[in-house]
Amino acid sequence: MRIVSLSKDISLKRPLEMGNAEQMKTVKMVLADVKSRGDAAIAEYSEKWDRVKLHEFRVSTEEINHAKANFDAELLKDLEEAAHNIRVFHEKQKRSSYQVDVENGSFIGQRVSPLDAVGLYVPGGSAAYPSSVLMNVIPAQVAGVERIVIVSPPNDQGALPDAVLVAASILGIEEIYKIGGAQAIAALAYGTESISPVDKITGPGNVFVALAKREVFGVVAIDMIAGPSEIAIIADETAYADEVAADLLSQAEHDPMACPILLTTSDFFAHEVAHEVEKQLTKLPREKIARAAVEKFGRIYVAETMEDIVEAVNKLAPEHLEIMTSNPQVVAQQVRHAGAIFIGRYSSEPIGDYFAGTNHVLPTNSTARFSSPLSVDDFIKKTSIIYYTQETWLQHAPKIARLARMEGLEGHARAVESRGWAKEMDQS
Amino acid sequence: MRIVSLSKDISLKRPLEMGNAEQMKTVKMVLADVKSRGDAAIAEYSEKWDRVKLHEFRVSTEEINHAKANFDAELLKDLEEAAHNIRVFHEKQKRSSYQVDVENGSFIGQRVSPLDAVGLYVPGGSAAYPSSVLMNVIPAQVAGVERIVIVSPPNDQGALPDAVLVAASILGIEEIYKIGGAQAIAALAYGTESISPVDKITGPGNVFVALAKREVFGVVAIDMIAGPSEIAIIADETAYADEVAADLLSQAEHDPMACPILLTTSDFFAHEVAHEVEKQLTKLPREKIARAAVEKFGRIYVAETMEDIVEAVNKLAPEHLEIMTSNPQVVAQQVRHAGAIFIGRYSSEPIGDYFAGTNHVLPTNSTARFSSPLSVDDFIKKTSIIYYTQETWLQHAPKIARLARMEGLEGHARAVESRGWAKEMDQS
């Protein structure tokens, strides 16, 4: 892992472009085709890309029961405990409607209500991501969303992983479709004969899924388009090099484009960590992926002072930030921009990925400057309410008409004046 | 105005496309040019499109004082009262950070903090929109944003309207630039020698501004891309045709693409309103714009029952909804999807545009199904905090490692195990 001096123009330096023209063309074609031909198009694309002939997209109760019966009891308990922790954390994000009373019985207010229906994309293929199910479904449930749909590409036997079905089952989700790729996004956005459309699509996916989500944005809402994972670790000489190296690699193993960064005030520690990273890399099952990330985007920055490091981190606004210094709480207070901050030696990043209760869907690519972790807020919407009585209207109509005329909007002024007072005054 | 029977497949039926290829090319060129040449490029585009040679982009204290000295005292009071109402309403949207205690001194939490810097685009040219200043700046101030910048295109004398400067001055905003168009969006997103970049850009603008905002999205955050205005009015025979017509025209006068819709159970009332619309149209200063909107997108839907109307409105999810029926509060409860709901005869829509206190930046184009009015939420962001003690880590690490291995992420499992217990157990 390269060791460099910290400089003022630090950035993640990753390309922001997603997908190429060929991929975009394919996505547009699939979206249009599913929009016009519905289920028939879905079935064809499933056969083509998932290599499976589906007679029924929806997962049956039998399949879910079978998955539960097969599932490891200890892992089931782990998932249930994680789900509980996630629910407790997200319950605190619930919002209430409110009302501000004006005079004479008039009021204005904000009504908070859940979205009607949301769809969650769970990546599939060779791996199983039950944690994605928990992290996306639970905030939607806490928000009060009535219809929650899961889509996920099946294996070549036409099945979804037991772990995904069990995670869904723990949460009481029963509308699950064995479809993936851009065709699944199209089904959720436009609907087909067998799948009703939703209002928002969340969850990660490959480049086709990401491009499709961006393309249907506006027809439905989407969550962020997540980029490759990032971790920045602030560590001084009180940290342990092997632990820091292990945490850097935990993110590097996600993606060859992942970005593992260490910022330290100790040149000696920098070299220790570089050595440990190399040592651990050779033993890692996903060595190839992790090594690509470490070599291309991995950096160890050595800085003069902790102040310089904090300034750099606020510029990077990393998705994950770990702080392993003699006074991690103090440093955490100084960091303004990060998706999630893991404080101290024992707060290893995977704790947040799976278990603590915070959401693992976090803003990437420096967008933590202005974006937030996935939360209950992503599954509600607000409506303004205005109720003016005759007395309140009478009192304020002249002011509103003046303001409208100042902006050259005579029609606005006449509308507010149309309720009687001006009629009596004979406005013509 | 066309009168038709309400049918099940009601929709706003407006094209979603924004801008053409030529306009997009211009915008991309301007963005790239300002990014590379900064102030010099801005000055050139201002001369080209705003027909003004600017030696200084920033509005001076003298200009602001001059605007205040010139300003009508009654209008100043109106603006101040509107600002007060808006502030009171938005204060209720403030969020608090929270913390969930885990065992042994561990905790997880959500930190809420304001964005560092935001830029507000105020449309200009021939008209002045001080209400845009109030509606965008106040939520940002309530959120606690420290740096709020206004950009607005000047007239050909190189000046901004007094009303805009006075509105900004009421709110204490002093960083105002006399620049507009895509070049202003570029300056806010990338920064120039004289203008520091911001984290989020809000506010309406013409097609070039909208395209530029969409293009810089990701580098900075943006608010929604607002489409043409919409109003749906639910009215029965207890309503007054002239008042309903005036309110329909108040939105029609905004834009030839605006969409004024009436839904009623009374065929007689439908014809009354159609007659009134025509009568009032001929006297409207902005007749040409309003007439285009009425003829192209205006509709009066006659329905059998109020239930059918509510169902249709929930499909339309209109930006503005007025309810003028014998029991408007009951109908309002049944509507799930609208940007803002105006209840009863005296709650004419312009009340919300200027004065009541709710925000006039509202979701258009049926996006009220999943989007919300501009609010304090748009100017804050959240950060997750995770702090695990040694005891808590010790208790849960085996579960977290199991969950990670289930997903095939051995590096995650090793990271969480690296803190000692596994070392002691000799993990190799």
Image (tube, coloured by chain):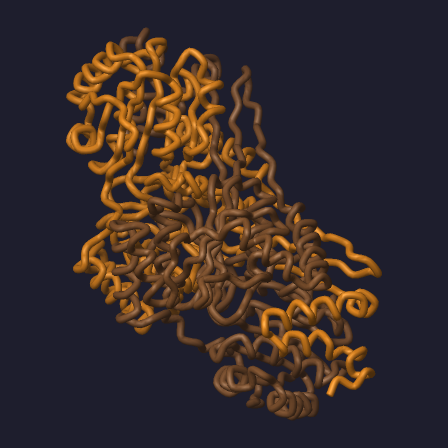
Chain colours: A orange, B brown
Q: Quadrant of the N terminus of chain A?
A: top left
Q: Position of residue B247 (x, y in %)?
A: 65, 77
Q: Is residue B334 visible?
A: no
Task: Indicate the quadrant where residue B269 lies.
Answer: bottom right
Front in this rendered view, residue A335 or B26: B26
Query: Looking at the image, how many numbered discs can be counted on the residues?
Result: 0
Q: Position of residue B406 (x, y in %)?
A: 32, 32
Front in this rendered view, residue A136 or A194: A136
Q: Position of residue B100 (x, y in %)?
A: 57, 28
Relative to B264, does residue A285 appear above or below in the rendering? above
**Farthest residue toward the top?**
B424
Left/right placement of residue A209 relative to residue A92 reads left
Q: Quadrant of the C terminus of chain A?
A: bottom right
Front in this rendered view, residue A321 or A120: A321
Q: Is residue A70 visible?
A: yes
Task: Indicate the quadrant where residue A55 lies.
Answer: bottom left
Image point (35%, 26%), residue name = B402
Image point (74%, 66%), residue name = B329
Q: Position of residue A224 (x, y in %)?
A: 39, 48
Left/right placement of residue B418 relative to residue A380 reads left
Image point (18%, 20%), residue name = A283
